[in-house]
Amino acid sequence: MPVGNPAPPAILEFLESDLAPVTPTGTPTPSWVFLAATAEEQFANAAALAERASLPGCTVRIAYSIKTNPDERFLSLARSKGFLAEAISQLEVNKALACGFHRDQIILNGPGKWWPQAVPLAEPIQAIFCDSPEELERIARGLNNGGTPPAHVIGVRLRAPHIASRFGASVWSPAEFARLVDLVRRIPEAVSFGCHYHFPSSALGIEQWWSLYHSVLRWARALDLCSGIRVRTLDVGGGWFPDDFFTDFAERLAAAVSSAKRILNHLDDVVIEPGKALVQPAMALAVRVLEVRRDDARADVRAVVVDGSLAEVPVSHLYPHRILVRDAWTGRWNPLGKGHGTILGRICMEDDVLAHGVKLPRTIRAGDIMTICDVGAYDRSMAYEFGRG
């Protein structure tokens, strides 16, 4: 179980502004808080990063992952920054369209992208990346039978050797690679071809992710050379922690794009899908203290029970979440540092522990407000109803 850690001062400055409306009497709990200033900063920084890394003849674009958080406020912000929208289902395509994205700003990927029912598009979307050779074969067959291209770019998600993944077309064996080359050759010249690769750096590790990135470039070049169909678009992601994305990834991106352009000579676009890096810091969960527990009346606080739970913060065990407590006297938000306290959730589940190893102030009392930060990604999108009758 991750332990809490203090919020960095620069981020705390944004949080002070974003959390100003959260008060003990005016805020129902548990409730989600959209951190508008933080979100604006994250999205603006990503847009600037893409602009700096672009090359003459090769544009870097950011794609917003709808599944990470489908909140319309994030989608509207993404659209305002010129981002693409990356969808994994027809429901998400419809959500993007409803939020003002044009069809040529939408990328469709994943194994269930045509669920629940494929709706014929009046105009092609930007890109479709097939998750299997079977899907690529189906789409190529439709195009060669006179079908209207469903996207400007038709591509394939690659599963590189030595990576255990359920996604993408394997290039492990010569037979698998030869089959993929044959299918790529069937893509009509009127449609551009692209390669897609997503694997979370938070699961793989930063250096391993970069090693895999360069491996994918070589496999994409092999497809390009063996099929004679030029790779025009490269789509890579995702799953960066925010700090990793805006430091390590940002520092290496320009060189990575240059490498891609050098290896894939006909490359027009590099699409970056930052995933949780954009939205994880941009929402918080306001919770209220229900009970304070001490070993005796004068001892330090051992634990607090709050009205939030794993139902609202389902991935709290995967990484540390910054936690702030509102000082009842000054109204200021103070970050919890490291200590020996525990924050317990409200539900009757043994694993409903929201934080271990935090220093709880001795003055904390029932009714005080806390905010659990860094919940804007999968904590929010995967939250569920539980214990509410």
Image (cartoon, helix red, strand yellow):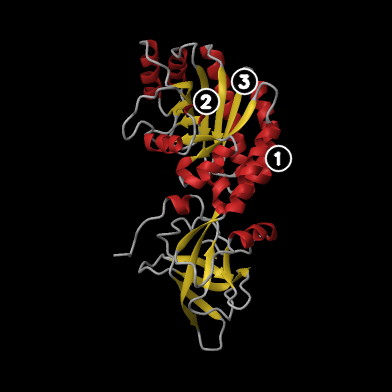
Quarter location, residue 180: top left
Relative to 140, is 119 above or below? Answer: below
Residue type, numbered disc 1? Glu
The kind of secondary structure element at disc 3 is: loop
* N-term mark: 1 or 2: 2
- Tags 1 and 2 in contact by the CB under 8 Å rule? no
Q: Which residue in the protein does label 1 denote? A: 251
Left/right placement of residue 45 relative to residue 126 reads right
Q: Which residue in the protein does label 2 denote? A: 195
- For marks 3 and 1, give the CA distance: 21 Å
Can residue 202 be seen?
yes
Q: Position of residue 276 (x, y in %)?
A: 54, 46
Relative to 221, is 340 above or below? Answer: below
The kind of secondary structure element at disc 2 is: strand
The kind of secondary structure element at disc 1 is: helix
* N-term mark: 2 or 3: 2
Residue drawn 69% across the image and 57% down it: 10
Left/right placement of residue 120 relative to residue 339 reads left
**What numbered label is drawn on residue 345?**
none
Residue type, numbered disc 3? Leu
Q: Residues within 10 Å of mark 1 (few under 14, many from 20)?
A: some
- For marks 2 and 3, give the CA distance: 11 Å
Residue type, numbered disc 2? Cys
Which of the pair 355/176 is nearer the observer?
A: 355
Q: Position of residue 32 (x, y in %)?
A: 48, 59
Which of the pair 149/265 is nearer the observer?
A: 149
* N-term mark: 3 or 1: 1
Q: Residues within 10 Å of mark 3 (few under 14, many from 20)?
A: many
Q: Which residue in the protein does label 3 denote? A: 264
Relative to 232, is 253 above or below? Answer: below
